[in-house]
Image: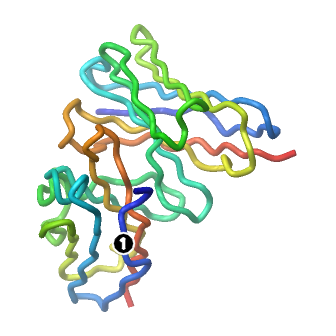
Amino acid sequence: QSALTQPPSASGSPGQSVTISCTGTSSDVGGYNCVSWYQQHPGKAPKLMIYEVSKRPSGVPDRFSGSKSGNTASLTVSGLQAEDEADYYCSSCVDNYTWLFGGGTKLTVL
Amino acid sequence: QVQLVQSGAEVKKPGASVRVSCKASGYTFTNYAIHWVRQAPGQRLEWMGYINAGNGDTKYSQRFHGRVTITRDASANTAYMEVTSLTSEDTAVYYCTRKERGMSFPFDHWGQGTLVTVSS
């Protein structure tokens, strides 16, 4: 598998919630609790937002949350703010000790 | 604080090779792995491979195996990534990123990225 599957775009108004999905297989997303999510603003390096499916690094607002069901992981952004507008990528380890990224989702705050 | 500082932008001709460096500071270099991820213009992140900075073990994506070599100089807290036989499809920003050893840990700190342009 070359990439995890994410929707190319998502959007919401300020204050609303939006959920981004990330679908893989039982060899990656479904087989391990190693899904992480990264936020990337234009021209910047990615920033870790969620790791081990649902854990937040210090400094990441609790508006960001993660979950997983079967082969699909999800990132939910609640109380959308203008600065949340960015590209979001999921990542998962794979059972041959390699890693995959998703195709990326462009989040637009309307 | 943890920092990963990468070497500057490169312009290469097709068929050439490029080596990008990643100097780490603010943590014990040999306790972590350094992974390399690239992003072609307007495209997704793509995992390339990694090196265990402690013992030098490496693993590569099958997509790049044979064309990419990752090394490290533990005495200089620096990792290197070389790509050979460059084509225009290798034009991308190349990132190094730190990861604690163990499958579940994430890429928690990233370098600033190095733009490699392949053009005749």
Q: Where is residue B100 in the image (x, y as percent from the top left)?
A: 23, 33
Furthest toward the right, the residue is B120
The quadrant in which residue A2 appears is bottom left
Quarter occupied by the N terminus of chain B: top left
| Residue linked to disc 1 | A6
Other-residue count near label 1 (Cα within 10 Å), few / some / many at <14 / 14–19 / ≥20? many
Residue shown at 31% from the left, 55% from the top: A91
Nearer the observer, B89 or A59:
B89
Tag 1's secondary structure? loop
Answer left or right for A30 relative to B24. left
Q: Position of residue B39 (x, y in %)?
A: 54, 53
Answer left or right for B67 relative to B54. right
**Relative to B114, is B40 above or below?**
below
Quarter occupied by the C terminus of chain B: top right
Answer left or right for B97 relative to A23. right
Residue shown at 47% from the left, 44% from the top: B37
Q: Position of residue B4 (x, y in %)?
A: 42, 33
Q: Position of residue B81 (x, y in %)?
A: 54, 28
Query: What amino acid does circle 1 point to?
Result: Gln
Write down the chain letter for disc 1: A
Nearer the observer, A11 or B71:
B71
Q: How many marks?
A: 1
Residue shown at 16% from the left, 51% from the top: A32
Furthest toward the top, the residue is B75
Residue shown at 36% from the left, 83% from the top: A10
**Relative to B108, is B16 above or below?**
above
Q: How is the image coloured?
A: rainbow
Nearer the observer, B3 or A6:
A6
**Relative to B94, is A80 above or below?**
below
